[in-house]
Amino acid sequence: MSATVNIPVNIPLEMIRGLTFPGLILQCVDPVTGDPVHLAGKTPFAEVRREADDDLILDLTPEVSNVDDTQILIPTKDITETANVLRGFFNWALTIGTDDTNRFGPFAVGTFSISDTIAKGDPPQPA
């Protein structure tokens, strides 16, 4: 049996300024066998830019997570972190490397829109 897997995976993301960005967990598996891919000793990079060689708009600060190092966590950004992010339509990409200069991928890409909420007033506060 053969399967067609599109790499990179297309994952469009959206952030609304002044609201919590929920984050994302990506399970890393071999696209052919479905076996978990262990990322011990690797560093994920998830960056938002207009185009590939443009200045960095936002670092999504991903990290390898879970006990067996097979997941990448793009953490939650709270309302103070999203409040003053540049508004616009951008692109993001996830690469994996051994350091900042030795990167492979991208393994995930997508559009990344940053907008303002249209609601008036203060957002509800957690209880």
Image: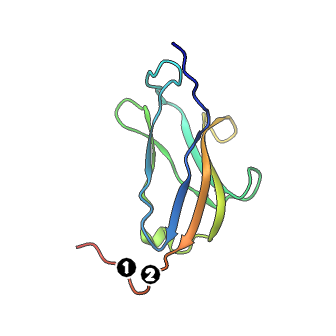
What's the mark number on residue 17? Answer: none
> In which image quadrant can residue 65 be found?
top left
> Regarding mark 2 in the picture, which secondary structure is present there?
loop
**Distance between the alpha carbons at the discs numbered 1 and 2:** 8 Å
> In which image quadrant can residue 49 be found?
bottom right
* Residue shown at 54% from the left, 33% from the top: 42
Residue sitting nearer the eye, 84 or 15 = 15
Residue sitting nearer the eye, 63 or 114 = 114
Quadrant, the C terminus: bottom left
User: Do tag 1 and tag 2 residues touch (Cβ < 8 Å)?
Assistant: yes
What is the x, y in percent for residue 57? 65, 62
What is the x, y in percent for residue 45? 58, 45
Horizontally, residue 57 falls left or right of residue 16, namely: right
Q: Amino acid at mark 2?
A: Ala
* Residue shown at 55% from the left, 38% from the top: 43
* Marker count (numbered): 2
Circle 1 residue: 123
> Regarding mark 1 in the picture, which secondary structure is present there?
loop
* Residue shown at 59% from the left, 57% from the top: 112
Q: Amino acid at mark 1?
A: Pro
Residue sitting nearer the eye, 44 or 101 = 44
In this view, the residue farthest toward the front is: 1
Horizontally, residue 90 falls left or right of residue 38, namely: right
Other residues around mark 1 within 10 Å, as few (<14) / some (14–19) / many (≥20)? few
* Residue shown at 44% from the left, 49% from the top: 24
Other residues around mark 2 within 10 Å, as few (<14) / some (14–19) / many (≥20)? few
Circle 2 residue: 119
Horizontally, residue 54 falls left or right of residue 22, namely: right
